[in-house]
Image (cartoon, rainbow, N blue to C red):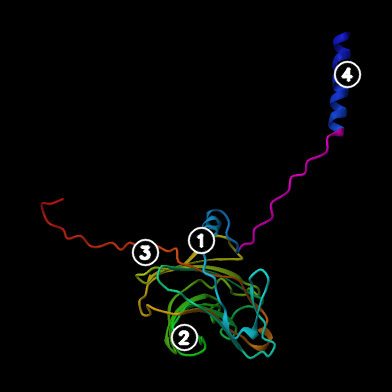
Amino acid sequence: MKQTCFLLMLGVVALIFIQCTPPVFMEEPEEASPTEDTGWHAVIEEATAYDTLSWQGETGKFRLTDNGTIRLNDSLRTGSACLYTPLRTPDRTGWVMQVNCSFNPSARNHARLYLMSTSADLNGPLNGYFLQIGGAKDCIYFYCQTGKKIRLLAQSEAFMRGNTSPKVRLHVQRDSLGYFDITYTTTESSDRHTLCFLRDTTVTSAAYSGILCIYTPGNSRKMSFPTFKIHHQVTDTQELKPVKYVPGKS
């Protein structure tokens, strides 16, 4: 009987303790944007020392927000707008860029991200390399430009077909031997896709990087660039040298 009373009292005390203890709410983590790097990619970016960029050019056609996003803001609807920033060196250099469009990119409405340019005037003749977001085939295109001529080096699948608000994040590395390693992520997948890994030494020096927007009047405020960063923490690709075979020797 005494044991039964003791157990009953113990149960009452436990019930009172549970009712008086405030509930603990577990905060759910915010869902990462498909174009944001998570995991080890994010750790790498946090540990990277980026250049301080000084944007020049047609600054009146753009708006720089407090968080660093560059937004196209051409009230005169002139059809093209460019910004450039000095590039210390194109050797052992990396670029991290993001492009957001509020329309389906096309041959008349697209963005060009100049990795390298010998001229600050991205609308004129120059020597360099650029990535074009959108075109006749709804792809990412990688071009080499010499003067006014452009030569296609690589292109992605047509993943932007029918997409009226594509967001693309690009990672580019170029070593001192002229190898380009270009990957990208999209709103459809956070996985990195390889655009190309190739060597091209047509242009080996440049003084500028930049942004060139091409658009019709209705899209003069519908492009933004949340990220445009440059660093120089790239190592050279190790080329495999042929070894001469000598019979009888190992």
Are the residues flagged by discs 1 and 3 in contact, CB closer than 8 Å? no
Residue under pointer 3: 236
Quadrant holding the N terminus: top right
CA separation, marks 2 and 4? Answer: 86 Å
Q: Position of residue 84 (x, y in %)?
A: 53, 81
Query: Residue shown at 62%/62% (left/top)?
Result: 34
Q: Sequence-wise, which precedes: disc 2 or disc 3? A: 2
Identify residue for label 1.
Answer: 48
Please give the name of the residue rendered at 87% of the width and 33% of the height, measured from the top-left corner: 19
Q: What type is the residue that disc 2 sits on?
A: Ser
Taking 184 as reference, is 239 left or right? left
Which residue lies at the image location 11% right of the left edge and 55% below the top edge?
247
Magenta region, main secondary structure:
loop
Residue 38, given in percent of the width and then of the height, sits at 58, 56
Q: Secondary structure at mark 2?
A: loop
Question: How many angstroms separate mark 2 from mark 3 (CA)?
Answer: 26 Å
Q: Earlier in the sequence, mark 2 or mark 1?
A: 1
Disc 4 marks which residue? 9
